[in-house]
Image: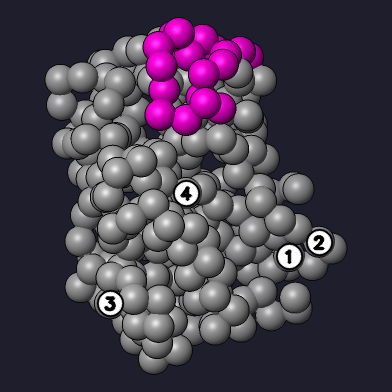
Amino acid sequence: MKKIVAPSLLLLSINAYAHEWQESPEITQLFQEAGISGTFILYDPINQRLIGHDHERATTPFVPASTFKVPHTLIGLSVGAVDSVDEVLPYGGEPQPFDVWEQDMGLREAIELSNVPIYQALARRIGKEPMQTALRELDYGNAEIGEHVDDFWLVGPLEISAIEQAYFLLELAQGTLPVSNSVQQATRDIILLEHDESWALYGKTGWENAPDPGIGWWVGWVQEGETLYPFALNLDIEKAGDAAKRVELGKASLEALGIPKNR
């Protein structure tokens, strides 16, 4: 899908985070009925406001876990650590918590399977200093990687809030991040989840501390015509069954807001 930039969104000051917040009773009810502690936020470009559930949590930073695979892909392609999203990387041969991670693969497949060891191999190829520099240029969360280049998005010190996630993804959706258009397009392509003639859904899940209890994420955006709706959800995963609620609650929250409108 070709890049479409919504003119109204170009007025957005990404670093300001000063938009009006509207609490959604419908989304709050969805979380309460699911018995889940978490947040969902969406930037509404029509009314230029943030709408969702639990504003305080939406501003609270957490480890991004596998949602970091989105900027990670941008960085890997930008610095030439891989030539394309289909260049095969080694997983390293060590036992993994999920069998599907125990194979070599490219980023296109790895991001779909949320394959941690493949992206750890990519991080080592990128290197600590280039990774740190790129994170600061992207203005991603607190942009801190600490001493280890291959786990900072899994255990810290990197952290980002749901609102920051949504604004970062808005820039990616618009193609306005400080990397080449081709790199942004390649990254958008591999996180496209659903689409038809009038709308498209992009997204990436994350699970800090998988497969044990931790923080779960689902972030992305809906593109409908020339309008972009970036969103971010995070929640407390208390048991393995809660992981499925990331996308379930996210889609239900979008539906409660009537997005996409023409679905």
* Tag 1 secondary structure: strand
Q: Is residue 42 visible?
A: yes
- Label ID, residue 199: 1
Sequence-earlier tag: 3 or 4: 3
Q: Which stretch is magenta?
A: 87-104
Q: Which residue is mark 3?
A: 54
Image spot of residue 80 (x, y percent): 51, 14
Q: Residues within 10 Å of mark 1 (few under 14, many from 20)?
A: some
Q: Which residue is mark 2?
A: 196
Which of the 4 image quarters holds residue 234?
bottom left
Apparent side of residue 52 relative to residue 226 in the rendered image (left or right): left
Q: Which residue is mark 4?
A: 205
Apparent side of residue 63 relative to residue 174 in the rendered image (left or right): left
Circles 4 and 1 in contact, beta carbons < 8 Å: no
Residue type at numbered disc 3: Asp
Q: Is residue 17 magenta?
A: no
* Tag 4 secondary structure: strand
Sequence-earlier tag: 1 or 3: 3
Circles 2 and 4 in contact, beta carbons < 8 Å: no
Q: Nearer the viewer, residue 238 or 255?
A: 238
Q: Residue at x 49, y 84 (%)?
A: 47
Gap in angstroms between the C-alphas marked 3 and 4:
20 Å
Q: Residue at x 79, y 67 (%)?
A: 198
